[in-house]
Image (cartoon, rainbow, N blue to C red):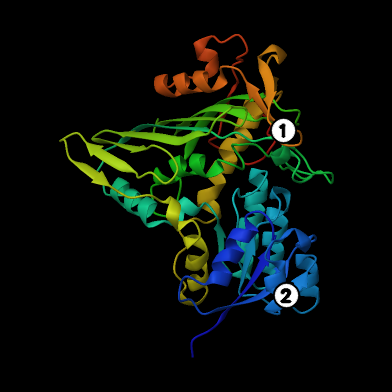
Amino acid sequence: MKKTVTIAVVGLGGYGEVYLQGLLEQPEKVDFALIAGIDPKPENCSRLPLLKKLGVPIYSSLDSFYAEGGKADLVLLSSPIQLHSVHTCLALEKGSNVLCEKPLAGSIQEADVMIKARNRNGKFVAIGYQWSFTDTIQAIKRDVLAGKFGAPKRLKTLALWPRDFAYYNRNNWAGRQKSGDGRWILDSPVNNAVAHYLHNMLFVLGDQMTSSARLLSVEAELYRANPIENYDTAALRVLTDRDVEILFLVSHAVPEMIGPIKHYEFENATLTFSGLNSHFIARFSDGTKKDYGSPDPQQIKKMWDCTRAVTSGEEIACGIEAAREQTRVMNGAQESMPTIVEFPQNLLSKTGEAGKQLTVCAGLAEEMQECYKRYQLPSERELGWAVRGQKIDLRNYSHFPSAQK
């Protein structure tokens, strides 16, 4: 008899609403039952009236769900970053499989705690880097592994996404390095808003369909325009153990949205992506071209893949091991520049209405675009505000902060 997969959603606001939309509209023929919504402030969820109408029980915490006898085959986690490891491990110990939203966690050591909990309980953990699950990225990765592009040489991504005062004040952890109880958050564009674009470069270079590249080092420049603990602008250069250079340039302190723009250079081909909902296009040295389509329309394919995997046992496209390399890079970047550099006040201005004001650094967008074109970090362009970070060895990096000096 076919099993109905029971699902609980943790975090009903923010990205949790994306999961709820898919579950409530049921665009795919998957046999499931939504058995719980879990959130300390469920009133912030626009779909709460419908959940109540459908008789879906609402719990204030994952602990209370399990304490009251709750059981779920699959838990969808959209909780704050500092709770990803805690909630994942709890769900595993209670017999649930987990789809945890990106990023994996605030520290690399939490990833290892999650791996041990998964192995101990025999359930799967997927990390919600949605592109990794899509037909587009899966097809690209198969062709990379088959050698159709030749050896990888260098990859780069530019993502300039404005984020305003309301974004940084939507909760008590945005832009923070640590939570009040001492857990690492390290919220930043690299570890939140555009983390999936860094992960994708690492993922397509993995030597298996479910792995990411092995890393050699990271050099980072971290800046801020907003009055936050962590950074809102970053430039990273990552080297893999095969000497492939990865450049990642991101900022929230810009006036207009640009990107993600991507250029993946291989020995016999280049892959390009020119912005949201555009297509990955491969251009080969023999003059031929291949359109891989766009990964963006399949945003919640990960959820349906995980739902099916509960009963089918299918391999998960992006698990903890694949996702932890982004965490390793992100942690290394923090150590590369432990003191965040503040942009000069005379370059900063605010636009927009009160409560939604956007802080912009003059000329930053243009300079980041030049860095992208030239494969440079800001300090290499000898900009007055730019500071070079330390190169951090990632080969055996397993704890943040590490003992590296």
Badge 1, how many Cα within 10 Å: few under 14, some, many 20+? few
Please report whichever mark, 1 or 2, sits nearer to the chain's N-terminal start: 2
Q: Are marks 1 and 2 in contact (CB under 8 Å)?
A: no
Query: Which residue bears the numbered disc 1?
Result: 353
Looking at the image, which is closer to me, 238 or 131?
A: 131
Q: Residue at x 56, y 47 (%)?
A: 324
Q: Residue at x 50, y 13 (%)?
A: 380
Say which amino acid is labelled 2.
Answer: Lys
Nearest to the eye among marks 1 and 2: give it.
1
Locate residue 101: give its quadrant.
bottom right
Q: Position of residue 3 (x, y in %)?
A: 53, 84
Q: Position of residue 42 (x, y in %)?
A: 76, 63
Relative side of 220 to 107, left or right: left
Relative side of 211 to 36, left or right: left
Q: CA distance from mark 1 to mark 2?
A: 35 Å
Q: Residue at x 44, y 69 (%)?
A: 314
Camera sees residue 147: no
Say which amino acid is labelled 1.
Answer: Glu
Q: Position of residue 357 (x, y in %)?
A: 71, 32
Looking at the image, which is closer to me, 150 or 227?
A: 227
Query: Which residue bears the numbered disc 2?
Result: 52
* Secondary element type, mark 2: helix
Mark linked to residue 36: none
Q: Residue furthest bottom?
A: 1
Locate residue 120: give its quadrant.
bottom right
Badge 2, how many Cα within 10 Å: few under 14, some, many 20+? few
Looking at the image, which is closer to me, 386 or 203?
A: 386
* Secondary element type, mark 1: loop
Q: Position of residue 44 (x, y in %)?
A: 75, 58
Camera sees residue 311: yes
